[in-house]
Amino acid sequence: MAAPSRYLRTSGVHATIEPDPWNPQAAVLSIAGAEQSHVNLAAPQEVFYEYLRRIANALDLLKPRGESITALHLGAGALTLARYLQATRPGSVQHAVELERELLDFVLEQLPLPEGTQLTSVVADARAGLAQLPPDVKFDAVIVDIFSGPDAPAHLACADFYREAAALLAPGGILAVNVGDEPGFTLVASQCRALQEVMPHVAAYGTSMLFTRRYPGNIIFLAGKDPWPATWAEQLRAAGPHPATVLTAVELDELGG
């Protein structure tokens, strides 16, 4: 039987959702044939993809275990992290901005959200969607998951976009940006500089070998207005996946060079 699929009009490609061959309770979302998200419906607190697990590790440190937060997801995918927050921090208030209306509908039809999830969706470009959010809501986490290679849209891969997103942060909140890039890491370097222009505290978090710039992969940038707690970087390294590297302050100079 063919996997369920949906045509995405904005990008002109198809999205499919297929069972995980190794886990009957899990599914994989692919767009244009490339895997994008993994969801474990039976255990949404288990995050399979490495880069999403690292963002989840950062979310774990925002507040005491189990305490609800407010979160904004720019780029919805299969809503893996929205499911994670509902499982680990029940009652969290979440918003998602997704460019592809058909993708949101498809994911919610095929992979329903856990009962009790408070998630409001906006169909819009990630930057334009910021203006459509409730004006009185501030977020403990703004998660940017819209970059998949060096050809990122210029109006998103820039300091002005990060400045607008950072304005939505609550005190102590973080801006978490996933940057997928090719060897050389030109996009990673430019996003490092853009975030440093906007935010006083920036960290880069990822698999240790990626910082050689010789391999493709995902670097997670974490940016905030407040200093990181003293043990924060070590907690992220210990949380894995291993081996993990966290760079902060002057350690970022070479990465953004």
Image (tube, rainbow, N blue to C red):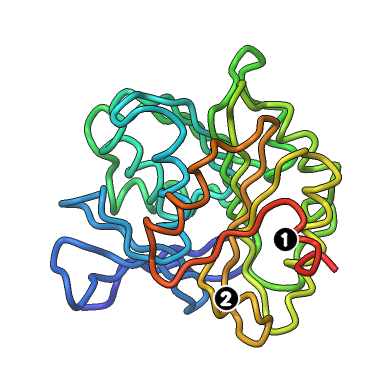
The residue that label 1 is drawn on is 251
Quadrant containing the N terminus in the rendered view: bottom left
Q: Nearer the viewer, residue 161 or 248?
A: 248
Which mark sits nearer the N-terminus, 2 or 1? Answer: 2
Q: Is residue 78 left or right of residue 179?
A: left
- Proximity of marks 2 and 1: CB atoms separated by less than 8 Å: no
The residue that label 2 is drawn on is 217
Q: Position of residue 81 (x, y in %)?
A: 40, 47
Residue drawn at point x = 86 percent, y = 45 percent: 197
Q: Position of residue 9 (x, y in %)?
A: 60, 60
Residue drawn at point x = 69 percent, y = 84 percent: 183
Kind of residue sitting beneath label 1: Glu
Q: Nearer the viewer, residue 12 or 72?
A: 72
Q: Position of residue 214 (x, y in %)?
A: 66, 87
Q: Is residue 179 left or right of residue 79?
A: right
Name above or below for residue 99 compared with residue 21: above
